[in-house]
Amino acid sequence: MELRKDPITRSWVVVGHSGYAELPADPCPLCPGNEGDTRTILQLPAQGAWQVRVLPHFRPLYHIEGEPGRSAEGIYDRMSGVGAHEILVDTPNHGHWVADEPDEHVEVVLEAYARRIADLKGDPRFKYVAVFKNRGANSGEEWTHSHSQIAATTFVPRRVLYELRAARDWFHERDRCVFCDILRQEEKQKKRVVDSQGDYLAFCPYASRVPFETWIMPRRHAHLFEAPGAEDFHALGELLARVVRRLRSVAHGYHLVVHTAPNSLQTKGELSDYWKSIAEDYHWHIEILPVVPTGEKSYVIKEVYFNALLPEQAAELLRQVDPGR
Ligand SMILES: [Zn+2]
Ligand SMILES: [Zn+2]
Ligand SMILES: [Zn+2]
């Protein structure tokens, strides 16, 4: 397993990963009482029965040991699959959606997201920490027990990299944050606003990729979701839960992803251009892409692409096939 960079889009792909074919499923490994000998990375509350629990992924895309060891192969770049891949069990109740739990519970889930991001960013090898969640039928969820995933990587995922580039360019041209500009216009026009709570606004983005795509953004400019004490997770939790409950009436499930700034310990190399203005030009947000009923194409959030078959093996197999006529 290794990471390879597409020289044109500059995005990294995990190749040679075996996928999630043999994940433990029965009995549910995420239920309380079935923890077995899995390591608890974080549990909230810290004492007593857990409401949120973080454990290492059973089939991690990345491994925590070693150095990224970036090397060249001719014109190409590759790295070893160093990183962290964790499961965040966001409720102890097997059949529940997080949005059905009390508002205080959703706040605890957001708090756990923030703590894991901050903790993993303490490791200077990691450039980015992704938090994402697939929930419901056809969402690509790995277990039906509600959970999120945390992935710390030695590269910035493609979608975030696009956002960083665009936000920096906008800022350089106009001296303003593009996300703040979007918020101001959406709040003024109100055409695409879904809901709001405290300092947070939920709206359908102008160029939505799927029906009912919804973003949640803080009204006050902030580039870090995980900045301690900076965010009011109570209000955010209330809004997020209401948005998910609304989406559930039109969708089978959803993909959720938290977009925050990369690791500030990583100021060299690829990211050096971004850091000069990142605190002013990037603005954290949550993107929710519903899985809509059949007939509509679903957009699966992987944040990173993985491919079990090495292209060298793929080419060999294809050469052996008789092309016929
Ligand atoms: Zn379960
Ligand atoms: Zn902003
Ligand atoms: Zn985003």
Image (spheres, helix red, strand yellow):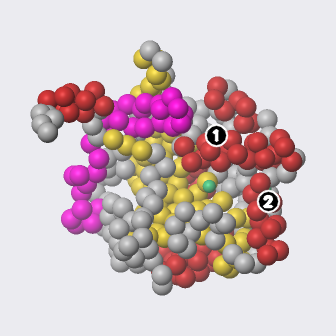
Asked if the residue at label 1 sits under 8 Å from ligand 3, the reply is no
Give the residue pinned by disc 1. 263
Helix, strand or loop under label 2: helix
Q: Find residue 16 and report its horizontal and vertical position in percent.
A: 30, 35
Q: Residues within 10 Å of mark 1 (few under 14, many from 20)?
A: many
Closest to the camera, between mark 1 and mark 2, is 2
* Mark positioned earlier in the residue sequence (1 or 2): 2
Helix, strand or loop under label 1: loop
Q: Find residue 166 and report its horizontal and vertical position in percent.
A: 70, 45
The answer to whether residue 11 is magenta is yes
* Numbered tag placed on residue 304 in the rendering: none
Q: Find residue 74 and report its horizontal and vertical position in percent.
A: 44, 15
Give the residue pinned by disc 2. 180
Q: Is 85 located above or below residue 219 in the figure?
A: above
**Image quadrant containing the N terminus:** top left
Give the quarter of the image for residue 285: bottom right
Q: Residue at x 54, y 59 (%)?
A: 257
Q: Residue at x 58, y 57 (%)?
A: 258
The answer to whether residue 233 is magenta is no
Q: Find residue 58 and report its horizontal and vertical position in percent.
A: 32, 50
Asked if the residue at label 2 sits under 8 Å from ligand 2, the reply is yes
Q: Give amino acid for label 2.
A: Cys
**Image quadrant containing the C terminus:** top left
Left or right: 72 in relation to 218: left
